[in-house]
Structures are given as structure tokens and as C-alpha cells.
Amino acid sequence: MKVILTETFKKKYKSLSIVEQTLFKEKLNLLLTNWFNYPSLRIHKLSWKLSFVFSMSINMNYRALFYKTQEKNEIVLEFFSIWNHDIYKK
């Protein structure tokens, strides 16, 4: 599996606390191991117009958003944003 972090993602990542950054790294490692075995990641597709976007829980407040594509025989995860969970409530 290949992971890409966009510049926008990197900027938002830097704005997180050290604790949240560490949590993201831990969750990413679980994701790369086998995301189906870790329900705590709460990975799901977003709905409606964003149905091609996946969301992964960092903690109860933050979600990492990514696209999942395939290049030849390799799955590519492109992380492009971090959102506060409150955005879902709007």
C-alpha cells in the first residue's frame, strides 16, 4: 500500500497537537496493517456528493480524509484533509 500526504493535509496535520499527531501515526499504522481488523478506525465512505471520500477516526474530534485508488497492483491512499467532526453536523 502506498500513502500520499498532500500539502493541504500536511498543513492541517502540523496544526494538530503532538498527541493528535501521534494518534494519527498510530492509526495510519493500523490502517496499513489491515483496516478491516480495526473497527476503532471507524473508516467509512462519506455520503452524497462525497461518496468517493473515506474518513478515518483520529480521535473523537478529528477525522483524516482520504481517497483510495489503485495503481497497477498497488492500493494508493491519498490523505488530503483533516476535519473536526463538527463539520458533519453542519
Image: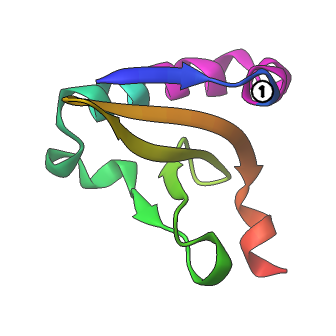
Q: Answer whether residue 14 is magenta in the image.
A: yes
Q: Residue furthest front?
A: 72
Q: Main secondary structure of the magenta part?
A: helix
Q: Answer whether residue 19 is magenta in the image.
A: yes
The image shows residue 13 at horizontal and vertical percentages of 74, 24
Figure quadrant of the N terminus: top left
Give the side of residue 9 with respect to residue 74, left or right. Answer: right
Give the side of residue 53 with respect to residue 72, left or right. Answer: right
Magenta stretch, residue numbers: 9-25
Write down the residue under mark 1: 16
Residue at 55% of width from left, 70% of height from top?
46
Give the side of residue 83 with respect to residue 3, left or right. Answer: right
The image shows residue 89 at horizontal and vertical percentages of 77, 79
Residue at 73% of width from left, 29% of height from top?
9
Q: Name the image quarter holding residue 53.
A: bottom right
Residue at 72% of width from left, 73% of height from top?
88
| Numbered disc total | 1
Q: Amino acid at mark 1?
A: Leu
Q: Name the image quarter holding residue 22.
A: top right
